């Protein structure tokens, strides 16, 4: 598993968009994104 620090998210909707984008990357099986923690 890889953990990423995500900056610039301003709401829960941003987290959903980041999750969707990460899941489109070849080789990514799933993604968990936390707006509150600023991580994925």
Image: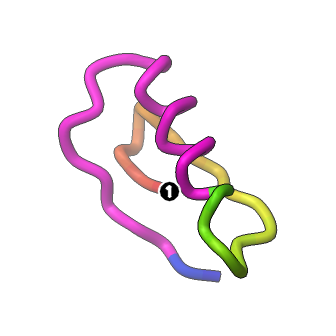
Above or below, 11 against 31 in this view is above
Above or below, 39 against 19 in this view is below
Would you say 24 lies left or right of 4 here?
right
Magenta-drawn stretch contains 6: yes
In the image, 36 versus 12, the foreground residue is 12
Task: Please provide the residue range marked out in magenta.
Answer: 3-22
Residue at horizontal 76 percent and vertical 61 percent from the top: 30
In the image, 20 versus 31, the foreground residue is 20
- Which image quadrant for residue 5? bottom left
Question: Outermost residue toward the right?
Answer: 29
x then y, percent, for residue 6: 31, 52
Would you say 19 lies left or right of 23 here?
left
Magenta-drawn stretch contains 14: yes
Disc 1 element: loop
In the image, 40 versus 36, the foreground residue is 40
The quarter of the rendered structure image containing the N terminus is bottom right
In the image, 3 versus 19, the foreground residue is 19
- How many marks can you see? 1
Badge 1: few (under 14), some or many (20 or more) residues near its Cα, within 10 Å?
Answer: some
Residue at horizontal 40 percent and vertical 43 percent from the top: 37
Instruction: Determine which residue is flagged by label 1.
Output: 40
Residue at horizontal 48 percent and vertical 18 percent from the top: 13
Above or below, 7 against 23 in this view is above
The image's colour scheme reads rainbow
Question: Outermost residue toward the left?
Answer: 8
Residue at horizontal 60 percent and vertical 67 percent from the top: 25
Above or below, 9 against 33 in this view is above
x then y, percent, for residue 33: 55, 46
x then y, percent, for residue 20: 62, 42
């Amino acid at each position: 598993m890889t953990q990423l620090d995500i900056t610039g998210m301003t709401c829960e909707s941003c987290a959903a968009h980041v999750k969707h984008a990460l899941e489109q990357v070849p080789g990514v099986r799933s993604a968990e994104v936390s707006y509150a923690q600023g991580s994925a």
